[in-house]
Amino acid sequence: MSDVVRYETEGRVAVITLDRPEARNAIDGRVASGLEAAVDRLEADPDVWVGILAAEGPVFCAGADLKAISQGRIAELSTPGGGFAGFARKPRTKPIIAAVHALAVAGGFELVLSCDLVVASRSAGFALPEVKRALIAGAGGLVRLPRRLPRNVATEIALTGDPITAERAHALGLVNRLCDEGGTLAAAHELAAAIVVNAPVAVRLSKRVIDSADERADDEGFATSGRLHGELEASEDFKEGPLAFIEKRPPRWTGR
């Protein structure tokens, strides 16, 4: 297990915790390898039937480490078997609940969308701000979000880069359980408990049927996203976005 990803079990439930609060739990190579190892451990343990993805600190996850991107180390943010963060495309048979206590943005929101269920605090929020940095949400955000929310809402989130509140996300069906601040993990355990009382094989097969409906769309969507991201990387704005963020100044877009 990585030093920035914790893995703990409680009965039939495993809690996987992002623990890089000083960097807003941004995804770097250590987080990616740690998350993939945690999912492998969850899948391999016959006594654990449900996972919870949680995080420490004031932000759930700020997404990709832009310093790594600006330094040309984008490859380390993904793993061959799990995609972005070692998680976004990781094959799984067991359900994972996202316990979102605070803001989940960019790749952090894509981690949430990679989970099967979502519990969120009223103080949480969700955003895909990639367009503000001359990036696109290439880890599943643009593929999965239109299936979780009405198309117009998903388009608004993707094209403005502005966040939506947990309360709005709950009203629109993205969030399963909404809870008070400080109660996210307890609410996730409550939802997990409602799952683990059921037959584990039936749960896994039910998840498989649900997932199978989306697999082809995921494959096609990720292929398109990857191709278009290659075009974006060739633009001047692709270099300017992360650099402006690091230098704490407004970006100077050229459209080229």
Image: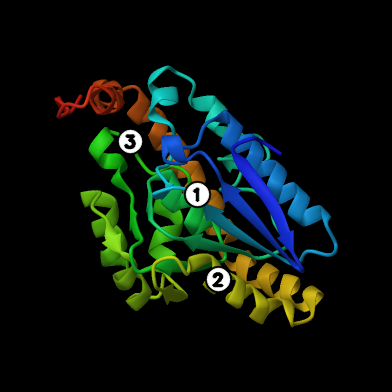
Q: Dividing the image into 4 quarters, which one contains the N terminus? A: top right
| Vertical order, 225 against 239 (above or below) | below
Going by the picture, which residue comes out furthest to the right?
Answer: 46
Q: Write down the quadrant of residue 174 in the picture.
A: bottom left
| Vertical order, 8 against 121 (above or below) | above
Question: What's the amino acid at mark 2?
Answer: Ala
Query: Which of 213/198 is in front?
Result: 198
- Where residue 193 appears, x then y in whole percent? 67, 77
Q: Are marks 1 and 2 in contact (CB under 8 Å)?
A: no
Residue for point 83% across, 57% down: 45
Query: Which of 21/42 is in front?
Result: 21
> Nearer the N terminus, badge 3 or badge 2?
3
Residue ID for mark 1: 56
- Where residue 233 appears, x then y in whole percent? 36, 25
Residue 93 seen from this side? no
Residue for point 24% across, 58% down: 156
Which structural element holds mark 2? helix
Q: Dividing the image into 4 quarters, which one contains the C terminus? A: top left
Frontmost of labels 3 and 2 is 2
- Where residue 248 appears, x then y in whole percent? 21, 27
Q: How is the image coloured?
A: rainbow
> Nearer the N terminus, badge 1 or badge 2?
1
> Nearer the N terminus, badge 1 or badge 3?
1
Question: What's the amino acid at mark 3?
Answer: Leu
Which structural element holds mark 3? loop
Question: What's the amino acid at mark 1?
Answer: Glu
Frontmost of labels 1 and 3 is 1
C-alpha span from label 1 to label 2:
15 Å
Residue ID for mark 3: 135
C-alpha span from label 3 to label 2:
35 Å
Residue ID for mark 2: 186
